[in-house]
């Protein structure tokens, strides 16, 4: 399962040989660790057009020193870009500094929300920022990421900016993330070491793989974690829960009464509902029997719809709660042999889009999804060698992600200060070449 190519290109002969052959050059990504919790280097604040954002206090609170010497992070405020001339200021601001941005550095571009009432010149150049972001992400290299955040005020986006400007977002690149207004009812202590203290999280499929990593990161951030998995995986679920100081719940999420069983298990309520359980049963449609179709749709979509409905209706999800579902780039881009899986994961994105505004209005709960790309787990270890190798390299970072990358993204969406992030499907895919 280890990525031997990545280790090989980290050696001098490996680098020499693979460069000569024109092969991909993945950079070892810097991820969060207790010893290295933040980026090391300056944060460079640039502006294109006239901005009205009050960004400086938010950037100051990231703890990164403001400066321009080999920056580890660049924030380009392009919210004031309104015509082709001010769009040129994006080029003028970034062109001279790009070479100096450190390896594993971050470029975050800020844009305005796309508004149906916008003047068409403004709409054109604000949309242009997406093509710009995605193109720069594909060419920048050296483990550096480029993302676009559409926002109206800096305070509501503070948790998002902190995430994107940290090592926690190592495998998130080429994304466009919308942050609404409001949702800013958080306290400075929420950015302490245990932002999820006092919160109860339920992680479905939490006994292994991505779900296990999600449980670990949420527990690190202070949450009490309930590890739900099928009865056959109960021993693993107990082992994980024991390590996290949480508890296990042996339950098949496709059971008709799964929502009721969870509600009964959590009479005091639940704050973070993480729909992670998922299965694949690949076959081309022409060879796919109905049971392979329905088993995938049942775990990946129908049970997500059923349990979400039951837990919202019963009031188990407390106000301020978060639902994070798991989509997949296969659902966004499509994948041969995965009509069942692709349908189920695209369905998750549809659920998020439609439920998010209502769940926030009625229950005070946000609804978002993570869409993993190629993540190194047992699921992808089972993929045949050459397809696996292609999957690993076909993204801007030229490597697979780790379960912790999905987990850190989930923790950002679950954060108490992320109340203005709603209805988003965020890909954790190293900017996969598949799909948008
Ligand atoms: P995994 O197979 O390693 O783990 C999935 C877990 O879900 C297992 O513990 C399994 O027992 C549990 N599960 C399955 N059916 C269940 C049910 N009916 N009730 C309760 N638990 C159930 O998979 P993973 O790679 O960790 O994937 C986790 C999620 O991420 C899935 O939704 C998957 O579709 C999605 N995903 C993974 C990748 C990847 O590259 N690994 C890519 C895109 C999306």
Image (cartoon, helix red, strand yellow):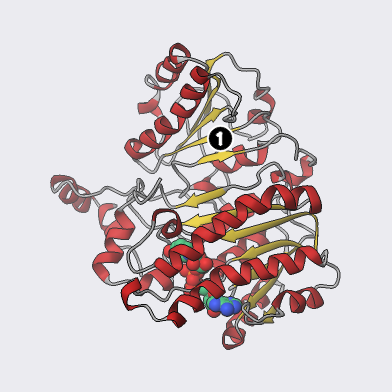
Query: As drawn, which residue projects farthest toward the left?
Result: 20
| Residue 69 location (% of width, % of height) | 46, 24
Quadrant position of the C terminus in the picture: top left
Q: Residue 339 or 57: which is nearer the viewer? A: 339
User: Which percent across, then down, holds residue 320?
Assistant: 78, 52
Residue that mark 1 sits on: 149
Quarter residue 225 falls in: bottom right
Looking at the rendered structure, the number of numbered marks drawn on it comes to 1
Look at the picture and state if 413 lies above or below 268: above
Could you tell me which residue is drawn at 74 percent across and 53 percent down? 359
41 vs 184, nearest the viewer = 184
Residue 34 appears in the picture as rendered: no
Q: Where residue 175 sits: x, y (%)?
A: 48, 42
Q: Is residue 23 visible?
A: yes
Hey, which residue is sitting farthest top in the picture?
85
Above or below, 431 relative to 5: above
Q: Is residue 193 above or below residue 66?
A: below
Q: Secondary structure at mark 1?
A: strand
Going 43% across and 15% down the picture, which residue do you hit? 84
| Disc 1 within 8 angstroms of ligand 1 (CB) | no
Question: How packed is label 1: few (under 14 Cα within 10 Å), some, or many (20 or more)?
Answer: many
In the image, 19 versus 348, the foreground residue is 348
Q: Is 141 displayed left or right of 83 in the figure? A: left
Of the 4 image quadrants, the one containing the N terminus is bottom left
Which residue appears farthest toward the right when viewing the image?
268
Q: Quick check: 117 left or right of 46?
A: right
Residue drawn at the location 41% of the way across and 40% of the way down: 144
Give the quadrant of residue 247. Answer: bottom right
């Amino acid at each position: 399962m280890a990525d031997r190519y990545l280790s090989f290109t980290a050696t001098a002969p490996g680098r020499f040989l693979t460069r000569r052959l024109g092969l991909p050059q993945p950079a070892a990504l810097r991820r969060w660790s207790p010893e290295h919790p933040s980026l090391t280097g300056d944060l460079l604040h640039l502006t294109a057009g006239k901005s009205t954002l009050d960004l400086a206090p938010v950037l100051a609170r990231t703890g990164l020193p403001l400066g321009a010497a080999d920056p580890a992070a660049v924030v380009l405020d392009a919210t004031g870009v309104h015509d082709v001339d001010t769009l040129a200021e994006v080029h003028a601001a970034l062109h001279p500094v790009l070479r100096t941005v450190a390896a594993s550095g971050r470029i975050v571009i800020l844009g305005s929300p796309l508004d149906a009432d916008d003047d068409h010149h403004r709409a054109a150049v604000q949309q242009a920022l997406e093509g710009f972001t995605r193109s720069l992400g594909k060419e920048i290299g050296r483990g550096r990421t480029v993302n676009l955040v559409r926002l109206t005020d800096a305070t509501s986006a503070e948790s998002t900016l902190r995430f994107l400007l940290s090592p926690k977002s190592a495998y998130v690149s080429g994304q466009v993330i919308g942050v609404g207004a409001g949702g800013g009812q958080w306290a400075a202590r929420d950015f302490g070491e245990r932002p999820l203290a006092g919160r109860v999280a339920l992680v479905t499929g939490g006994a292994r793989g991505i779900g296990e990593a999600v449980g670990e990161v949420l527990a690190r951030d202070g949450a009490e974690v309930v590890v739900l998995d099928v009865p056959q995986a109960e021993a693993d679920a107990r082992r994980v829960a024991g390590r996290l100081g949480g508890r296990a719940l042996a339950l098949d999420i496709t059971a008709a009464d799964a929502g009721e069983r969870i509600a009964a298990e959590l009479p005091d309520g639940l704050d973070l509902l993480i729909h992670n359980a998922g299965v694949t049963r690949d076959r081309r449609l022409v060879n796919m029997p109905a049971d392979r179709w329905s088993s995938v749709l049942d775990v990946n979509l129908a049970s997500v719809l059923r349990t979400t409905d039951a837990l919202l209706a019963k009031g188990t999800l407390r106000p301020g709660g978060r639902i994070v579902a798991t989509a997949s780039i296969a659902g966004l881009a499509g994948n041969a042999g995965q009509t069942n899986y692709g349908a189920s994961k695209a369905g998750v994105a549809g659920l998020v889009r439609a439920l998010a505004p209502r769940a926030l209005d009625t229950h005070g709960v946000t609804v978002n999804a993570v869409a993993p790309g190629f993540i190194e787990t047992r699921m992808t270890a089972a993929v045949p060698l050459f397809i696996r190798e292609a999957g690993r390299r076909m993204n801007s970072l030229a490597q697979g992600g780790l379960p912790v990358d999905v987990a850190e993204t989930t923790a950002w969406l679950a954060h108490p200060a992320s109340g203005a992030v709603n209805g988003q499907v965020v890909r954790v895919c190293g900017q996969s070449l598949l799909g948008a």
